[in-house]
Amino acid sequence: MPRGRHTALVIHLTADDRQALLAWQRSTTMPAGVVRRGRIILLLAERMPIAQIARTVGLSRRYVYKWASRFQAHGIAGLADTRDHWPRPQQAAQG
């Protein structure tokens, strides 16, 4: 088990959730952000400290907590992108 502080934040994964998140890690077609979020949840389920997860995935601790919260509230569906970034909608011409 990793050394350092342990968080009170505990993620319990069902077998199906774990399988889905592991499949995301092997996927070559999923968006990288979604895969990274899945990795965060897998590492939390393994009880890795938040700071170490943040370093591992290249995000701040704030975002680790954000995605953990979304997972707890909405399950795997909470890890999906909630808005489309591209293409950005064109603003109507003001006249």
Image (cartoon, rainbow, N blue to C red):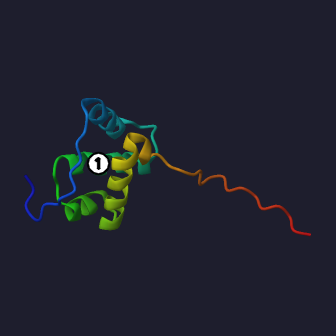
- 73 or 45: nearer the viewer: 73
- Which residue: 25% across, 34% down? 14
- 50 or 75: nearer the viewer: 75
Indicate the position of residue 25 as horizontal and vertical percent values: 32, 40
- Which residue: 37% across, 42% down? 75
Residue holding disc 1: 41
Indicate the position of residue 27 as horizontal and vertical percent values: 38, 36
- Which residue: 46% across, 45% down? 80
Relative to 40, say whether 17 is above or below. Answer: above
Left or right: 25, with 8 as reference point: right
Task: Please give the count of numbered marks on the rendered protein.
Answer: 1
- Which residue: 22% across, 56% down? 9
| Amino acid type assigned to the residue bearing label 1 in the image | Ile
Residue ranking furthest to the bottom: 95
The image quarter containing residue 53 is bottom left
The image quarter containing residue 21 is top left
10 Å crowding of disc 1: few (<14), some (14-19), many (20+): many
Residue ranking furthest to the front: 73
Left or right: 69, with 52 as reference point: right
Left or right: 73, with 92 as reference point: left
Say whether residue 44 is visible.
yes
Indicate the position of residue 39 as horizontal and vertical percent values: 30, 47
Relative to 15, say whether 9 is above or below. Answer: below
Say whether residue 60 is visible.
no
Q: Kindly state the secondary structure of the residue where label 1 is placed.
A: helix
- 35 or 46: nearer the viewer: 46
Screen quadrant of the C terminus: bottom right
